[in-house]
Amino acid sequence: MRILFVLDPLVALNAYKDSSVAMMQSLVARGHTLCVAMQGDLFIQNGVVCAKASSIELVPGADLHARAWWVETIAPIDTPLQEFGAVLMRKDPPFDMEYVYATHMLEYAQAQGAKVFNSGAAIRNHPEKLAITEFSEFTAPTLVSRDMARIKAFHAEHRDVIVKPLDGMGGTGVFRLAPNEANRNAILETLTHDGTRTIMAQRYIPEITQGDKRILIIGGQAVPYCLARIPLAGETRGNLAAGGRGVAQPLSDRDAYIARQVGPKLAQRGLLLVGLDVIGDYVTEVNVTSPTCFVEITEQTGFDVGARFVEALETAVGVSA
């Protein structure tokens, strides 16, 4: 198959740890070819959804810490998305209106016969923080609101809470409000933009010291290992971008149970790849835009996450290598 990746510029990727690059390596190993485009390269002309896409090849034995790990073999060509064997949407947030427009274009392309993963409608309909509210039986007490009085009452009830914006990533904008947080009002005013922006508040989960676990679900089935992102001392965020340390470990019985309950439902909606974030026994996010941690899990356990993803992709499109 010829696979189109819609993603950030290749020169901006940290190839040695990037999950999209791990996917590319596994695709090439199974005989598939690669094309790339950025979100801004998507367009609709005469009703047909297309991309200005380049063909690339991976450089065998390249140093993935350097930039020369790929070469362009065919300059960008305008191509209808339906002509690709599969389209992989791997653009990182922010989830702004340009991203929303891109999901609409991907949805239209699917109606024209393109095979898109994750599907445009599924990405758009599963905002990564809000999506946990569908599975409240697996979440800690949670409030979504921009009403500061309501948020303060939630804090008074649960005493120790986490507050965060709905559109953040990598741990940005996440605050812990301890029982006697002196800066509570200032934090809430800032996060809610003085009551004009909706945020999320959750009861603090002390098991964060043991790691914020990333559970990968591929084709509705969980990878048997997760990556526990363990915070720095004194930090409440386990995100790798916030300095967390990633430790791969087998899924606990609770992790596996959550994945069995949630995974198939999400897969049926067009989400081939999902990254569940779990702290202790509780789901805290449902990542659907560009879930990561392929490389860390593979390197530490020997379980080839990229190969599992490619097998699921081939099954989803009905094509084998």
Image: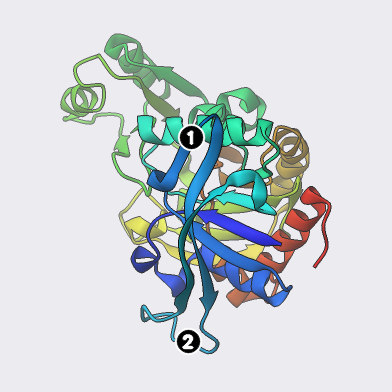
Q: Is residue 193 above or below residue 257?
A: above
Q: Judging from the image, what secondary structure is the residue with disc 2 in? A: loop
Q: In this view, does 110 lie above or below 93?
A: above
Residue 22 shows in this picture: yes
Mark 2 sits on what residue?
Answer: 62
Mark 1 sits on what residue?
Answer: 44
Q: Judging from the image, what secondary structure is the residue with disc 1 in? A: strand
Residue 131 found in image quarter: top right
Q: Are marks 1 and 2 in contact (CB under 8 Å)?
A: no
Check disc 1 and give the amino acid type. Ile
Q: Residue placed at 32% from the left, 15% from the top?
A: 146
Residue 286 shows in this picture: no
Check disc 2 and give the amino acid type. Ala
Residue 189 found in image quarter: top left
148 sits left or right of 54 in the view? left
Rendered location of residue 232, percent (x, y): 35, 61
The numbered mark, 1 or 2, whose residue comes first in the sequence reads 1
- Check the picture and name the quadrant holding the C terminus: bottom right
Q: Which residue occupies the foreground of this view, 222 or 41?
A: 41
